[in-house]
Image: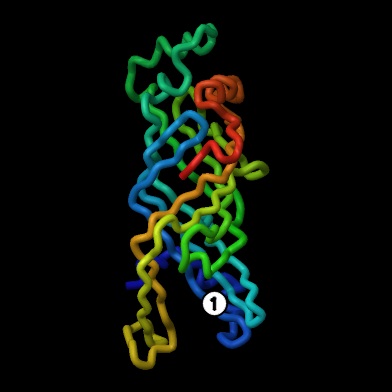
Amino acid sequence: DWAPFDRCPVDAPAMLAADGVNTIAACIASSSATGSITLGKSVVSTGHTDLQLGVVQRADGTASLVAPPEGALTADPAEIPGGLLGLMCPSGIPLISGICRQLTDNNLNRVTATIEPAGAPRDFNMSAAFSTGEPILTIPVRIHLKNPFLGDKCYIGTTANPVLLKPQNVTAPTLSLQRFGADGTPNDDEGEMGRYTFDGADQGDATFAVPGASGCGAGLLDWAVNLKTGLPSAAGKNSV
């Protein structure tokens, strides 16, 4: 079953150039059905997330990561509890209180947050996938907040100042190996290719800092979002 690797950048030049001896190309996939993220004073339940990468391992032990063109990480939008009412209201500021009075329509109140790539993953440590308590890699991300009043460019974190997630195994995974022939069919006895599966581990990170929001309501509502959610938030006060 190769479905977990459907976004692996197998056609990227660096992957195609691997000779199988001095450089070995592999695909990495990690998915989670549910989770949660705490940013400052806000706690949001997350849906399905999917991380896929190519990795080129060299004979000297070093490795390079290759992200898909659309970015390594994809995630389902998550609903902010309470919507815009919970994010900015109540407020004694006329601009904000005027918005709060209009939030009787659920579509106007609804706020979604989507984790998006904000740079290329780095610092990959393959051995950390076998163990617990060690960062497996660094993933730069930003969180896209969407609401009619916030506009389409409201983000927590930017490509210049991203949130740097460093997930690690909190519980140990179950390890299995399956081998495949060159044509992709299972062949446990003589298969040239192999797939390691690390299953059942809980992953998390509580080391990252979170910058303030930007671009919300053309920038006019940044301070309101930051005030209510407690952003920016220093490292150690956030978790995923």
Say which residue appears at 42% left-offset and 81% top-offset: 194
Q: Is residue 95 above or below residue 13?
A: above
Could you tell me residue 66's position as x and y percent?
58, 65
Q: Quadrant of the N terminus?
A: bottom left
Residue kind at label 1, given as amino acid type: Ala
Looking at the picture, does residue 153 appear above or below residue 61?
above
| Vertical side of 16 occupied by 144: above or below | above
**Residue at screen point 40% across, 13% down:** 102
For this rendering, which residue is in front, 235 or 223? Answer: 235
- In the rendered view, does 109 fall on the left or right side of 70? left
Q: Position of residue 199 (x, y in %)?
A: 35, 65
Q: Is residue 164 left or right of residue 171?
A: right
Which x, y percent locates residue 219? Answer: 61, 24
Q: Secondary structure at mark 1?
A: strand
Q: Which residue, as the protein is rendered here, is positioned at the far bottom?
A: 190
* Residue wearing tag 1: 25
Among the 4 quarters of the image, the one containing residue 191: bottom left
Q: Is residue 239 left or right of residue 188?
A: right
